[in-house]
Image (cartoon, helix red, strand yellow):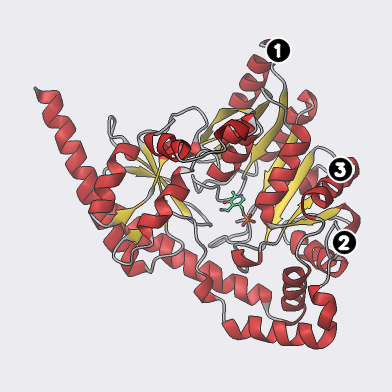
Amino acid sequence: MSNEQQQGNNLDSWLDAYAARAETLAVSEVRALFSVVSRPEVVSLAGGMPYVAALPQELLAKAYHDLMAKKGNLAIQYGGGQGDLVLRDQIRELMALEGIQSSVEDLVITTGSQHGLDLLSGLFLDKGDVVVAEGPSYVGALGIFRHYEADVEHVYTDHDGMSPEALQETITRLKAQGRKIKFLYLVPNFANPSGVTLSAERRPRILEICKREHILIIEDNPYGLLYFDKPVPDALRAVEEDGVVYLGSFSKILAPGFRVGYVLAPPAIRDKMVLAQESALLCPSSFTQMMISEYLANADWKGQIDTFRGVYKERKDAALAAMHEYLPGLHTTRPDGGFYLWVTLPDGVDSKAMLPLAVKELVAYTPGTAFYGDGTGQNKLRVCYSYPTPENIKVGIKRLATVINLQTELLETFKGR
Ligand code: PMP
């Protein structure tokens, strides 16, 4: 337990009353950064925030007026536990862009895809179960798995995504140890934090392994439509219906403040998801679902996604150019879409220990250890280029280079002694 947590606990008169699982709620490394990086003088390459300013506010104002004129009080009433039927039908069209055929019955709308993943984890995970995931993997998912007291087993992942050979080895080893693997959690497109995409060649192999080993796949795909030049390969769910639960979100292609995501699941899982959702929330927000529905019906949403793509591509180019100029010796991934670069630091440089120095230099990033459940990733860091302007990205990476170079020199001097 950290000093701050210890201090917080000393002030907490209800310490004896908490459930054991409350222990798993550690402050995430990303969250802990938010207070610091919101200072205007700090260039934040940390939190994965979409650039919502690229969405014209008039579009939302129009959606609001049209919605209230048409639906009035219905828009602020409780809705069904599975989510709005009209929106579910529109989501089918959205998912068809990634090759997915589905019916409205199999979709459940959730309060962001984060909530979908939480509901699924509650359905599947008992203490000591194993979730297999990419290495590195999304910090928010790791937090959920920890909360349900599951262990995460990372599988070797390179520039083409998760290695099928390594996946097979991991499954064989875990099964031999008598471990219960509950699902494979994957972010196949422009992954958070690595930026890499699972290749078209590996997709059927991963599907085949999981089918043979009877392991459910959770395909989390909030970034797939944010490609820079060419669309991503078809979703895993486009090929396999029964073995894949698909998570989608409006957070990155519209705005995260609506908190609307969706889950496409095989019927038995879907039924349980709806019951779990009703028990947790009664229903997702009618108002934000209907706002999105109105937006999809009347605004040029595909054109808006193109606008987002253009913005993020320009920022990715700025980030890679700055990496090349200021940190030419470092390896970084080169994403074809999404928000993130994954940077490897020189051996021995610890990105978590370096963070306070970086913040002093007025730049922030997310340390690599946040994206592993096993404490590894010390010499990695995530650069998120989605939010700062291209000019600020350049300034931020220049500052980052100052800190990294200083750390590297110090290590060299230390080694020389
Ligand atoms: N999955 C991944 C891979 C993400 O990066 C995020 C958000 N950063 C989420 C899920 C959660 O998205 P939402 O806003 O839909 O809850």
Camera-side residue of 354 and 13: 13
Residue type (three-letter) at the residue carrying disc 3: Lys
- Mark 2 vs mark 1, CA separation in Å: 41 Å
Front-most of 299 and 118? 118
Q: Tell me residue 236's x, y (percent).
A: 73, 44
The Cα atoms of the two marked residues, 3 and 2, are separated by: 15 Å
What residue did someone put label 2 on?
Answer: 80
Q: Is 66 left, or right, of 251 in this rendering?
A: right
Task: Assess whether mark 3 and mark 1 are in contact (beta carbons under 8 angstroms).
Answer: no
Going from N to C along the chain, the mark reached first, 1 or 3, is 1
Q: Residue at x 74, y 38 (%)?
A: 122
Q: Residue furthest front?
A: 13
Residue denoted by label 3 = 272
Disc nearest the viewer among 2 and 1: 2
Residue type indicated by callout 1: Gly
Residue 250 position (above or below residue 108) = below
Q: Is residue 226 above or below residue 346?
A: below
Question: Residue 268's spot in the image, x, y percent?
Answer: 90, 41
Compared with 385, 158 (above or below) is above
Per the image, label 2 sits on a secondary structure element best described as: loop
Report the side of 108 relative to 361 (left or right): right
Q: Earlier in the sequence, mark 2 or mark 1?
A: 2
Does 130 sit left or right of 10 as displayed?
Answer: right
Residue at screen point 70% across, 12% down = 178
* Of callouts 3 and 2, the N-terminal one: 2
The amino acid on which the numbered mark 2 sits, given as a three-letter code, is Gly
Q: Measure the C-alpha gap from mark 1 to mark 3.
A: 27 Å
Which residue was labeled with disc 1?
Answer: 178
Dividing the image into 4 quarters, which one contains the C terminus? top left
Mark 3 nearby-residue class (10 Å; few <14, some 14–19, many ≥20): some
- Quarter holding the N terminus is top left
How dense is the environment of label 2, judged by Cα within 10 Å: few (below 14), some, or many (20 and up)?
some
